Image (spheres, rainbow, N blue to C red):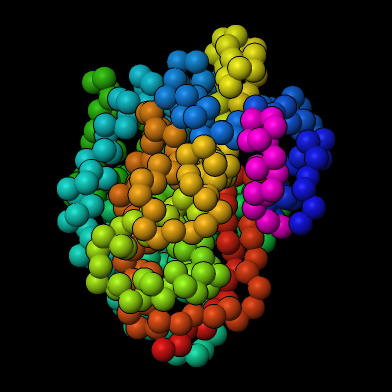
Amino acid sequence: MTAPALNSINLLEDTWAREVPHDQFALLRREDPVHWHELPVGEGFFAITRHADIIEASRNPEVWSVEKGSFFIRDQTPEALESLALTLVGMDPPKHSRFRRLVNAGFAPRMIRKLVEDIERRAAVLADQVEEGVELEFVERMAALLPLQVICEMMGIPAEDEGRIFDWSNRMVGFQDPDFRNTEEDGQIAAAEIYGYCDRLAAARLVDPRDDITSALVHGEVDGDKLTAHEINMFFVTLCVAGNETTRNLLAHTLLTLIDQPKVRAELVAGIDDDALWSSATEEFLRWNGSIHNFRRTATRDTEIGGVPVKAGQKAVLFYTSANRDEDVFPDPFTFDPRRTPNDHLAFGGGGPHFCLGAGLARSEIKALTRALLRRFPNVEPAGEPRRMRSDFINGIKHLPVRFTR
């Protein structure tokens, strides 16, 4: 591959639809780690590509705000900003901390440990449905189903409505990909539909509370006040989408890695009951291909990052994909090492207040489904070309045809 030049750097959606731009990131880390990137419309941004700089920005929300400009690269309308600021991922502390406490209990390590047995049971059921040698569309039939089932149960959504949540999620986050959103209005329609569904479920939980996260939202308080209907809507959407969309892509990337790395696959099959191996391998799957390319932050005051001056109001985009191949942090970063320790990847963010709420859940689901499949089918091969999502935010695999064999 021909090495890119700095003046040809393009980290927008069309690039990601073709490939993960590791060559561009390697160049930036080496020569211009805080790189000014123009946009076709609107003001550009600083692309932050080194591990240490991303951690610095992530852990200083008073300097690097998410609320002032959202977490998307492109600027939002005032109305969109107002709604995004009601999502956990779109809030700054201290508001973020107060709202996060409402749902923290549902994702605490002790709760995930209680869920593990159920996750493993669901993974085994899915793996048992696989027919040897028969082409399988992995994203729709496997990767989408396990996280969707788990998050819907946690939210109190009936199993018969899981397909609707799946459809709405695709149309809302796939706004840059024509396979998911056919018109400009379709994302808004999907949002309206899921808000209406949330309103009906919240009304039911108001009179009949249950042991689920929706009940916690309806009956919880922040600073002595109940959440408004709009706040509940935004919480509900964030948890439903993040709980199924991100882990779906992590599972698809994990399987694609196993196809591309037959020696790693053989090592995991040989150590199928080695919990330590599977734990370290799961972390390496997360480092190798996270589900989110980046998050944007906006400077609240004149500052600097990586020695580069940044003015108040300018935006910095934290590229986790680049940080996870940073040569200063990971020895031999372009080698997949299932026993890599330590593994300070940033697949769940750079720490600080926005560290991923569902990190433990995602780890459990990756380990459970991948292990269940390899127990039954030590071999997996491609049955067609994978297709990537066109998005400069979601690291998505939307089509992955495979065959499993013994």
Can you see residue 181?
Answer: no
Corner quadrant of residue 311: top right
Q: Nearer the viewer, residue 234 or 353?
A: 353
Tell whether 209 sits left or right of 289: left
Q: Quadrant of residue 30?
A: top right
Point out the residue furthest to the top here. 302
**In the image, 107: left or right of 329?**
left
The span picked out in magenta is 18-33
The C terminus, quarter of image: bottom left
- At x 42% / y 24%, what residue is drawn? 59
Foreground residue among 147 and 342: 342
Magenta highlight: main SS: helix
- The residue lying at 58 percent from left, 11 percent from top is 303
Give how far across and how far down residue 58 sits, in percent: 46, 27
Estimate the x, y position of residue 326 in percent, counting from the top left. 54, 41
Q: Is residue 276 left or right of residue 9?
A: left
Q: Position of residue 247 (x, y in %)?
A: 43, 56
If the image is split into quadrants, where does the N terminus sit? Answer: bottom right
On screen, 338 above or below 341?
below
Based on the picture, tell me whether residue 43 belongs to the magenta stretch.
Answer: no
Q: Could you say which is closer to the camera, residue 138 or residue 70?
A: 138
Q: Position of residue 185 (x, y in %)?
A: 67, 47
Q: Residue at x 61, y 17 (%)?
A: 307
Residue at 30 percent across and 62 percent down: it is 277
With respect to residue 32, does 371 lie above or below? below
Residue 245 position (above or below residue 239): below
Judging depth in this view, the residue of 139 and 171 nearest the camera is 139
Please say whether residue 21 is one of the residues in the magenta stretch: yes
